[in-house]
């Protein structure tokens, strides 16, 4: 049976939510993201794109390109609520779907043509989402995920497009090679230096040529350019790591401040582990200096989720990694090698008081929020905290403005 894969994308999602909340922002150039000079554009309205603005751009540059733009910091909790409403509607309509980000979904409609017209069915679902949420949405429908994603991008803004089976290559052929998923700025420049501009040229080349130029990735890009993709729709993907990082508005050399932030980060991520019944066996610390050189160091440890075990080890990694002569721009930590399990009691070091303390603190956090109880040493890190359980099967909300 041939596949039928639907790709759904909420157009300029953060911008659309902000406009729902404030009608005065309609038809105005709008930037969502970091409001400081080191902030990054998390989302931008179509009105700003004519000025050369795009997501991921430094906010300072975006303001220079489009000085009339309204800049909004954004609210991750608000975006999550709107995303959840859309998710529930999709869940009602389709048998299998994958939520790949807060505003992007894939759905497998294979076999539904026996009972419904898949395109008509997807159109009705889109109309319901628009009616009940007020958010613009686009979709692409084809035989695989890659072609559907490209079709969605071609359908935008607020539209829909179907690519019939067998017409994948003709559809992709006239497009710019930059529209192939996985072709970033660096790869695009490499391909342009070879004289490649359109997907059609890649389709006419042997796969081996692309592999010689780009290695394994060259073969993947060649297949995508030819509309070949067998990636399944995955309803749930177990997280293998959790992490957090913060960029400073001004580079700092204040060691006490850095230690306090690392403690707050570790305390919060350890709570997330316990809330999700997870344990970590590998921890790492990341530092980016003012010259943009980035270094990290990791350590294997016995499986744990205890603050009193993780915090000293994180601080030891930081001590070994940190160069005191340089100003720090960014710090972060990461817990990986995650497995399911509850906190393992250490027969020699743990006491009944420590275990009771964890139970009490976690109960308070679940009821009143992540930041309701903090160590005194980490109280200076005001923006440390999560809006939801990172192990609930949903992708994280990405806002490019976590600053300290």
Image: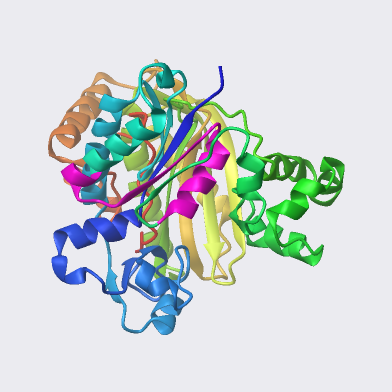
Q: Quadrant of residue 254?
A: bottom left
Q: Quadrant of residue 346?
A: top left
| 2 over 245 or under it: above or below | above
- Residue 45's spot in the image, x, y percent? 35, 66
Residue 258 as seen in the image, left or right of residue 30 = right
- Residue 381's spot in the image, x, y percent? 30, 57
Residue 196 as seen in the image, left or right of residue 30 = right
* Total numbered circles: 0
| 382 over 207 or under it: above or below | below
Q: Quadrant of residue 20?
A: bottom left
The answer to whether residue 316 is visible is no
Q: Quadrant of the N terminus?
A: top right
- Residue 247's spot in the image, x, y percent? 42, 63
Residue 261 as seen in the image, left or right of residue 128 = right
Going 32% across and 54% down the picture, which residue do you hit?
A: 13
Write the start and end of the magenta stretch as one range: 130-156
Going 59% across and 55% down the picture, which residue do you hit?
A: 179
Going 59% across and 50% down the picture, which residue do you hit?
A: 296
């Amino acid at each position: 049976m041939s596949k039928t894969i639907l790709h759904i994308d909420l157009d300029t999602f953060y911008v659309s939510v902000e406009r729902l909340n404030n009608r005065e922002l309609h038809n105005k150039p709008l930037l969502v993201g970091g409001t400081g000079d080191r902030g990054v554009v998390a989302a931008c309205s179509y009105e700003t794109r004519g000025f050369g603005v795009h997501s991921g751009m430094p906010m300072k540059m975006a303001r220079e390109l489009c000085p009339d733009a309204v800049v909004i910091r954004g609210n991750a909790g608000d975006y999550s609520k709107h995303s959840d409403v859309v998710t529930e509607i999709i869940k009602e309509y389709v048998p299998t779907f994958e939520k790949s980000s807060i505003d992007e979904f894939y759905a497998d409609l294979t076999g539904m043509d026996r009972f419904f017209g898949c395109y008509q069915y997807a159109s009705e679902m889109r109309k319901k989402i628009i009616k009940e949420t007020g958010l613009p949405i686009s979709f692409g429908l084809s035989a695989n995920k890659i072609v559907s994603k490209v079709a969605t991008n071609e359908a935008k803004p607020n539209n829909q497009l179907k690519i019939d089976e067998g017409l994948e290559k003709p559809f992709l052929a006239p497009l710019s090679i930059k529209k192939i998923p996985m072709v970033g700025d660096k790869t695009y420049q490499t391909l342009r230096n070879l004289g490649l501009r359109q997907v059609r040229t890649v389709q006419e080349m042997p796969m081996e040529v692309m592999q010689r130029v780009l290695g394994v990735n060259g073969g993947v890009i060649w297949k995508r350019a030819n509309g070949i993709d067998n990636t399944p729709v995955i309803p749930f993907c177990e997280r293998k790591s959790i992490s957090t990082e913060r960029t400073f508005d001004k580079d700092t050399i204040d060691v006490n401040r850095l230690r306090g932030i690392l403690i707050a980060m570790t305390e919060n991520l350890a709570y997330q582990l316990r809330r999700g019944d997870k344990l970590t066996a590998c921890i790492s610390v990341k530092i980016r200096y003012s010259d943009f050189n980035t270094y990290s160091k990791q350590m294997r440890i016995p499986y744990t989720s205890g603050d009193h075990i993780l915090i000293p080890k994180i601080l030891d990694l930081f001590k070994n990694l940190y160069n005191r002569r340089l100003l720090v721009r960014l710090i972060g930590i990461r817990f990986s090698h995650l497995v399911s399990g509850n906190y393992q009691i250490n027969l020699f070091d743990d006491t009944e008081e420590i275990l009771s303390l964890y139970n009490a603190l976690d109960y308070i956090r679940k009821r009143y929020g992540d930041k309701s109880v903090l160590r005194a040493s980490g109280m200076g890190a005001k923006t440390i905290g999560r809006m939801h359980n990172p192990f609930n099967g949903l992708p994280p909300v990405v806002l490019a403005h976590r600053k300290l």
